Image (cartoon, rainbow, N blue to C red):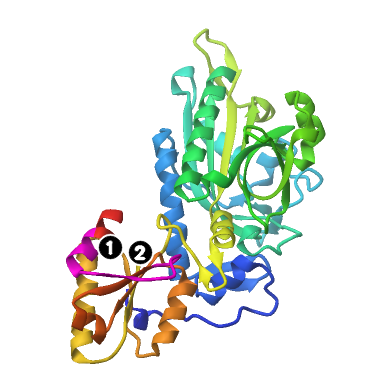
């Protein structure tokens, strides 16, 4: 993409009412636009980051033999009333609305009940189980604390997966496989070393759940972690969880974290309340076991923006960066323009994603934008580099650039693509 053709622009200052670092940086860099508190639009480069995150998650969900679909956002109260989760005393984040004829509807904050309701037409016997489905969808939650940028939004993108089973044993085995898949996801996103599987409250779901929490100064949770990092417990369930685990809570260390994923075992609770059953091999009708698995896609993006940034701007991990290379043309001579255009085409042909800064602006402005945008590599082409027969390549986190020949440059970047 040529930067001169994009409608977005970087800016020196974020909105005065935006206090979170992740949103300030993302707004300044032109990745997102703030509509109102907790509600953001994702602009072209922000969307590229989201899609890269989604593709990593999609890879791991597909590896679990889960199948992608998309459910409706509009929800019938009847389904949720059957499980007691339409009542705002049970779930306090509903956005509710009405049709023109007065019929009440909800805007989806989760999809356990709708998934079970839909799947009952496809699952009649034990031969139809197990099965697993997932989606990427914009969820709507009436959050009171929409003050952490895209880390806690009223409108956000989530990956939610649901697995259905004939037995507790089968559900437990699949659940453990999902935990390992989630570990792979966060490792590929660049936050694996700072992300823990934690014991947490089930909230509107179950007594206990497992959360995936990432160490982050801007987080809203306190996690208690063992020295060997094998045990992690959320503060809100510290006493109950440590007692159940048989752990001395005084030997755990407190860290500030942000939730990036949450998984639950519902067992047969939902299917029993909704009277959704399958016929087992013995001919007996039995309730279906259900588990639910979520990853906050936009929240993960916010956490990474918080963790991977410095005083100059964002620092995206290569796996999710919108582009791999920021190609800056310095000068407007025919020679520089020709060399820049040819390099841009060569990199694209080699499969390297490039943001080509072909604007006629000062070099200092281009360098500042390159740092703010956080793209992993900055490549400079100027009359000086052309004379030397080499290109100036700088990794975003390095202080000093290196000089490299074109053929070696393309080979290096393409091999890492």
> Residue under circle 2?
324
Answer yes or no: is residue 8 visible.
Answer: no
Residue 200 placement (x, y as % from top left): 71, 37
Residue 392 relative to residue 345: left or right: right
* Residue 352 disc label: 1
Depth check: give the residue in front, 140 or 212: 212
Say if the magenta span includes residue 363.
no
Residue 190 lies, in percent from the top left, at 48, 51
Q: Name the element at disc 1.
A: loop
Look at the picture and state if 225 lies above or below 98.
above
Q: Magenta span has 408? A: yes
Above or below, 132 relative to 335: above
Q: Does residue 269 appear in this view?
A: yes
Q: Eyeballing the image, is 394 above or below 86?
A: below
Which residue is painted at 79% across and 26% down in the image? 243
Q: Give the quadrant of the C terminus.
A: bottom left
Q: Nearer the viewer, residue 41 or 233?
A: 233
Furthest residue toward top? 282
Task: Tell me the distance, in whole angstroms, between the alpha carbons under discs 1 and 2.
Answer: 7 Å
Q: Which residues are magenta?
A: 395-411
Callout 1–callout 2 Cβ contact below 8 Å = yes
N-term-proximal mark, 1 vs 2 = 2
């Amino acid at each position: 993409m040529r930067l001169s053709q994009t409608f977005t622009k970087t800016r020196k200052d974020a909105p005065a009412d935006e206090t979170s670092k992740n949103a300030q940086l993302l707004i300044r860099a032109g990745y997102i636009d703030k509509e109102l508190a907790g509600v953001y639009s994702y602009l072209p480069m922000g969307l590229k980051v989201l899609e890269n995150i989604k593709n990593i998650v999609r890879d791991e969900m597909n590896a679990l033999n889960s199948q992608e679909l998309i459910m409706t956002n509009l929800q019938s109260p009847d389904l949720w009333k059957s499980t007691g989760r339409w009542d705002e005393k049970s779930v306090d984040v509903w956005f509710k609305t009405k049709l023109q004829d007065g019929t009440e509807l909800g805007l989806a904050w989760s999809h356990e009940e709708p998934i079970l309701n839909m799947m009952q037409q496809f699952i009649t016997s034990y031969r139809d189980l197990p099965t697993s489905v997932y989606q990427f969808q914009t969820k709507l939650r009436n959050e009171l604390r929409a003050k952490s940028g895209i880390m806690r939004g009223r409108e956000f993108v989530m990956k939610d997966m649901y697995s259905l089973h004939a037995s507790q044993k089968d559900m437990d085995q699949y659940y453990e496989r999902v935990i390992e898949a989630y570990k792979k996801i966060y490792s590929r996103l660049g936050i694996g070393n700072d992300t823990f599987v934690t014991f947490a409250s089930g909230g509107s779901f179950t007594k206990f759940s497992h959360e995936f929490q990432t160490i982050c100064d801007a987080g809203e949770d306190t996690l208690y972690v063992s020295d060997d990092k094998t045990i992690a417990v959320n503060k809100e369930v510290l006493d109950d969880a440590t007692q159940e685990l048989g752990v001395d809570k005084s030997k755990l260390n407190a860290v500030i974290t942000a939730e990036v994923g949450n998984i639950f075992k519902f067992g047969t609770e939902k299917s029993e309340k909704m009277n959704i059953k399958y016929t087992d091999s013995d001919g007996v009708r039995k309730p279906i076991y259900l588990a639910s698995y979520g990853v906050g896609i936009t929240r993960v993006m916010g956490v990474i923006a918080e963790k991977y940034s410095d005083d100059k701007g964002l620092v995206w991990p290569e796996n999710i960066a919108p582009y791999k290379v920021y190609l800056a043309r310095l000068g407007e001579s025919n020679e520089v323009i020709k060399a820049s255009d040819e390099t841009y085409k060569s990199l694209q042909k080699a499969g390297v994603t490039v943001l080509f800064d072909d604007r006629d602006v000062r070099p200092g402005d281009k360098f500042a934008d390159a740092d703010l945008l956080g793209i992993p590599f900055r490549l400079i082409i100027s009359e000086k580099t052309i004379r030397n027969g080499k290109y100036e390549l700088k990794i975003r986190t390095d202080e000093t650039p290196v000089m490299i020949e074109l053929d070696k440059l393309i080979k290096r970047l393409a091999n890492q693509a």
